[in-house]
Image (cartoon, grey):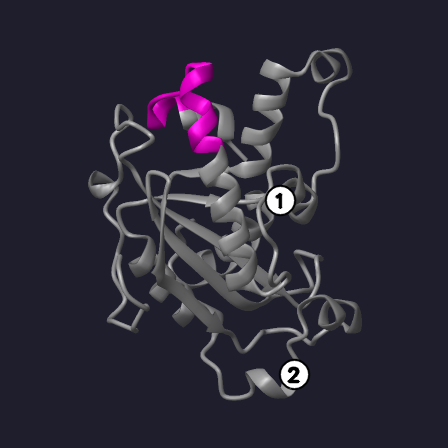
Amino acid sequence: MLGVFKREPAVVMDERFFPGQSTPIDQCRYAVIDTELTGLDFKKDSIVSIGAVAMTGGRIYLGGTFYEMVSPRTAFRSESVVVHNIMPSEVVGKPSADIVIQDLLTFCAGTVVVGHFLSLDLHFLNKELKAVSGRPFPNVVADTWRIHSWIQNQTDAASRDFGESGDRDLLTLAKKYNVPVAQAHDALGDAFITAQLFQRFLAILPGLGVRTIKELLKIGKP
């Protein structure tokens, strides 16, 4: 997991190599991911870039990163370009999503995959994977928004009374948990912000009774 990712031959993930349910959360390997898209319409849009950051427990590997731009299947929307600042000319000649996702699977081998509003990323990743192999993204996954919501409901009476509270977006939560934001709406930059947010949660969860991967996945299911 250490070092900048280099493309290797595609692999087929074997679920036997994923972390066991009894693995302590502070010993587990994680891959924190983010995608940028041409837009948010699952039927009409596609992936533009993918970023990921490696972690073991609360330790973030600054040199253990993955970032690839993708030649999307669909046209850019002007509103999405404003968000991620990737121009159509920048993805000319870039690999297709199915190739990049196979590389991502290699990077994520043996990890719990973590993301913020991860269901959106998984929708687009699964669309590409199913078109090629007929199989969905294989890793077990945890969503930082779901984890945050659960923590709030354990510690905040207002949240228990009124349900999920506060803003959901990544940058608002980063500010809430004192995560520095140097770069946003770049897939790798957002993955790094999410990793730091998750790092904060890993420090909080044992005190709330969440100590194993099984317990983490229960509260973090997208």
- Measured along the vertical axis of the image, is residue 158 above or below residue 18? above
Residues drawn in magenta: 201-215
Whole-percent x, y for residue 139 in the image:
36, 44
How far is disc 2 from disc 1 in space, using C-alphas? Answer: 30 Å
Whole-percent x, y for residue 194 in the image:
53, 48
Q: Nearer the viewer, mark 2 or mark 1?
A: 1
For mark 2, what is the residue?
Answer: 88
Q: Is residue 142 visible?
A: no
Residue at image position (66%, 37%) is 176
- Other-residue count near label 2 (Cα within 10 Å), few / some / many at <14 / 14–19 / ≥20: some
- Magenta stretch: dominant SS? helix
**Which of the two labelled residues, at mark 2 and mark 1, occupies the earlier sequence position?**
2
Query: Could you tell me how many numbered marks the image carries?
Result: 2
Amino acid type at mark 2: Pro
Secondary structure under the numbered disc 2 in the rendered image? helix
Asked where in the image residue 12 lies, by quadrant, the reply is: bottom left
Amino acid type at mark 1: Ala
Residue at image position (45%, 56%) is 130
